[in-house]
Amino acid sequence: MADLPIKDKITYAALDLFSQKGYDSTTVDEIADAVGMKGPNLYYYFKKKEDILQNIASIADVPYQGMFGYDNDAPIWIHNGEELKEFSWFLVKHTMDDELTVKLRRFCTIEQFRDSEVIHKLADHQYEVVLNLYIKLFSDMIKNGKAKDCNPNALALQFTAPISILIQLSDRQPNRRDEAMDMMNKHMDSFIDTYIIKE
Amino acid sequence: MTSMTVKEKILHVALDFFSQKGYTATTLDEIAEAAGMKAPNIYNYFKDKEDILRNIHLIADEPYQGLIGYDQKMPIWIHNGDELKQYTKYHVNHTITNETIVKLRKLCTIEQFKYDELAEKMSAHQYDLINALYERLFNEMIDKGSMKPGDPKVRALQYSAPITLLIQLYDRAPDRSDEVEKMLEDHLDTFIEAYCVNE
């Protein structure tokens, strides 16, 4: 964090507070305090609290950058159920444990009904980035005869939704994390058994 | 509304405010006024604002009563994919149009990380109850040969999670209702094709 531009430092600190206490309950002074500056100095970087939201949107992609599969032009090398499972567990662990991803998810969850275009876009983005990745993945697998010839959009939703719902369960009730992980594993096996063609 | 107790009336009024402006921004005075009483009188029924929030669940189960399937003792008459689809669409329609349910869902979404009671409520409705219902249903269908064999618990999650996720999307972006409806239709058709046995 030390070598981040001050603007980004402020943004990360703001996201930290917003995701814990909510946007309304967080004051500009608290954000300034968290980065070790006086409240009025923060106005030098952001004129109002709302402007920090804009900057949160710009750091939202950081955790995904360089990640296997998130670059739309890069091919995804998944040929069978084993590889699908391995890739998906890698994504799940990242989604559940990466600090920035966790904070962004919590922030979008608690603020999603706010009348803010920035937050709506951010929430849509989080949902679409994974779904689109799997639509592309299953389209390729169907084309190559590795998955059953079904609607790839429906397959992507059926694969990702149980995982999303289980991550939500674990976020909300951390004492149910093991149960959620166990169900994810069973879900992936069952999905592969139904839709992925055995070699 | 006339048969409501004063306590219930306060809860309904509070839910209106909480789901619209959020829990933090709502004052006890506003709730009292909208419930048609003087502010100090509200203390005869609830200790403070948080006490109201913690008791919201008292009115939460009411809109689900009489909804087919929620009563564990009631038999569910579903024999094939068509009936499954019809039942689910009826259920989804109830969930997205019943005002009390929509308000509760929004309130729980916003405040789930602050109050254990609301986290439990949310998990019950978006995970435990809904999955128990479909698990029981699929168990019967597998038994009677109208569904392919498999773990009914995992299959219930695979069926319900995409639906729950699409309802969340609809809550956040009602302007995308056409897209949500199309995705729901694709999911139900793909699932039924994969798992239901034609008579």
Image (spheres, coloured by chain):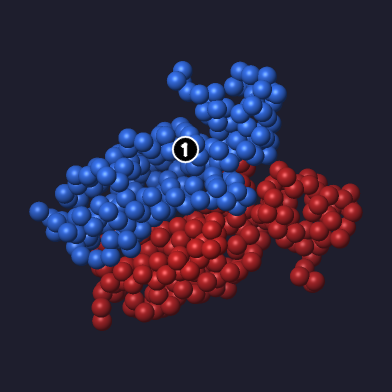
Furthest residue in direction bottom, as rendered: A199
Q: Which of the 4 image quadrants contains residue A79?
A: bottom left
Q: Residues within 10 Å of mark 1 (few under 14, many from 20)?
A: some
Tell me what hue chain A is rendered in: red
Residue A167 picture location, percent across and down: 49, 61
* Residue at 34%, 48% in the rendered image: B184
Residue B137 seen in the figure: yes
Q: Nearer the viewer, residue B141 or A140?
A: B141
Does residue B91 sit above or below A124 in this rendering?
above
Q: Secondary structure at mark 1?
A: helix
Q: Which chain is blue?
A: B
- B136 relative position to A187: left or right: left
Query: Number of marks in the image?
Result: 1
Residue that lies at the very extreme toward the left in this rendered image:
B199
Residue at image position (33%, 72%) is A189
- Say which amino acid is labelled 1: Ala
Q: Residue A45's image quarter? A: bottom right
Residue position marked by numbered label 1 in the rendering: B60
Residue A66, image x, y percentages: 57, 73
The quadrant where residue A161 appears: bottom left
State the image coordinates of residue A5 (x, y, percent, origin top left). 79, 65
Foreground of the two, B159 or B61: B61
Q: Residue furthest front?
A: B44
Measured along the vertical axis of the image, is residue B9 above or below residue A84? above
Q: What residue is at 49 percent from the left and 36 percent from the top?
A: B58
Q: Position of residue A3 (x, y in %)?
A: 79, 72
* Nearest to the observer: residue B38 or residue B194: B38
Relative to A71, residue A171 above or below:
above
Q: Nearer the viewer, residue B79 or B168?
A: B79
